[in-house]
Image: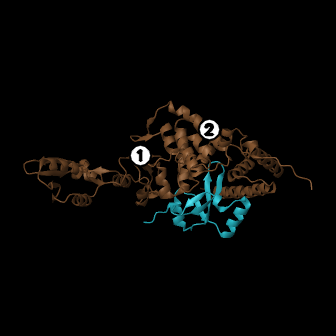
Amino acid sequence: MKRDILKHEMVPDHVILSKSKVNKLLKDKNIHAEQLPKIKIDDPVVKEIGAKSGDVLEITRKSATAGKFVTYRLVVE
Amino acid sequence: MPINLWHENRVLGDFVQELEKKVVKIIKKKKANFPESFIQDITEAAKRHELTDKELTELVGQIKKAYERAKVEDGEAVGTVAAQSVGEPGTQMTMRTFHYAGVAELNVTLGLPRLIEIVDARKKISTPTMAIFFEEEFRSDEEFVRKMANKIGKSTMKDIIKDFNINYAEMNVIVELNLEKIEDKRLDYDDIIARIEKAFKRVHIDNNILSFEPTTSNIRELRLLADKIRDLQISGVKNIGKVVIRKEEEEWVIHTEGSNLGTVLKMEGIDKVRTTTNDIHEIEKVLGIEAARNAIIHEAQRTMEEQGLTVDVRHIMLVADMMTADGKVKSIGRHGISGEKASVLARASFEETGKHLLRASIRGEIDHLTGIIENIIIGQPIPLGTGSVGVVMKQKK
């Protein structure tokens, strides 16, 4: 039986960002992709959503202080 | 629910949605960048006090001002503040009990030892434990939960034998199984026999009477065999020991000693949304780095709260963010964040001074003196707060 880890309450939503959105994000924040927090390619969530090395994931966390908080992680080897 | 009340509720819901849209619009107009929780709070307040549009606009303006003022300034030493804010209540923790008899019969490490375990990102924590929940249809099904508890919890031969005899004359061990106990524990007879046959080659099975023979006929071997039989595990998930079944608010929950999230989540009937463990590395392995971040925050805060101490989550969130920024859980301290600093002087001032200075001199490392510690060491103004900006004069052309 496949286990649906994406449904677990501790796992926030991970979405793969399109190239254009990544460029806009990096330009808005004035940073390089390498400056983002990382996520490993063998991370169970990365495997589940099928992201590739170099992709940027948009992570929508439930936050105790802000209600909802959007952050980004770069997929690395 | 009567139709008219239902209708009223729906109208109220529409009204709140409408109001929220209005709040969002005003916030946009004021060019404020509020988090989601603010929008909800403002909508709630507007509904409760029946604010007019003008009042609402004024409110948003005032909140914007207060919000901007409350924000952390550029160059603020948030890490130092976080360390102090977690560290000070930590001093009060040591004076209280180290181990605490937690959930029912299970002993769980709490207090300062647990907090140290979390920030050190220990691979082997001293008391791993799981809270296993069930899918909706099984939540009040005691029979099913007991069956699962016996499947998950560790049982050995000891638990199901009625009679145990070592026969020195005939050089064998005679075991009589207690069928009632097997029934009581909801174990499967055939499954147990299969496990026994797999573990012992020379065994004769006659219904519930088993006779084992040692490989070589001497008394030492016979005794070793007897011990081996008693300790043979006949059910249970790897790494999980004792289990405790409890009823918590109308639903059955299993607490375990030991933890194996990966295997338990694959089992049928288990709630795959709420079932959790206190082992952060296991969460990282099974649910990923973001879940590990949540686990660090949750565990650290729970540990503090259990001792009656409150620390603002933002400090703990910062710690958790730092620990997970590289994509794997990393400790604070010598082998983690402090040990990976770019500056030699900063590392040397923390721990293992000689080692860092020696290695840096061998490799010819360069210290660019960009950090706080380096500049304190050499007696320069530090790049912090107002020190993090410089003044440059604009030259006239």
Q: Residue furthest left?
A: B169
* Residue type (three-letter) at the residue carrying disc 1: Arg
Q: What hue does chain A carry in this figure?
A: cyan
| Quadrant of res B19 | bottom right
- Establish if B211 lies above or below B334: below
Instruction: State how the image is colored.
Output: by chain
User: For the residues tagged 1 and 2, is the chain the same?
Assistant: yes
Asked whether residue B293 is in view, the answer is yes
Q: Determine which residue is flagged by label 2.
A: B85
Give coordinates of residue A15: x percent, y percent.
Answer: 60, 64
Residue B2: give x, y in percent of width and height.
61, 56
Q: Which residue is mark 1?
A: B246
For this rendering, which residue is in front, B282 or B177?
B282
**Percent of width and height locating residue A54:** 60, 66
Residue at image point 73% right, 56% down: B20
Q: Are marks 1 and 2 in contact (CB under 8 Å)?
A: no
Distance from disc 1 to disc 2, alpha carbons, whole Å, reads 36 Å
Which of marks 2 and 1 precedes in the sequence?
2
Specify the amino acid type for callout 2: Ser
Chain in brown, by letter, is B
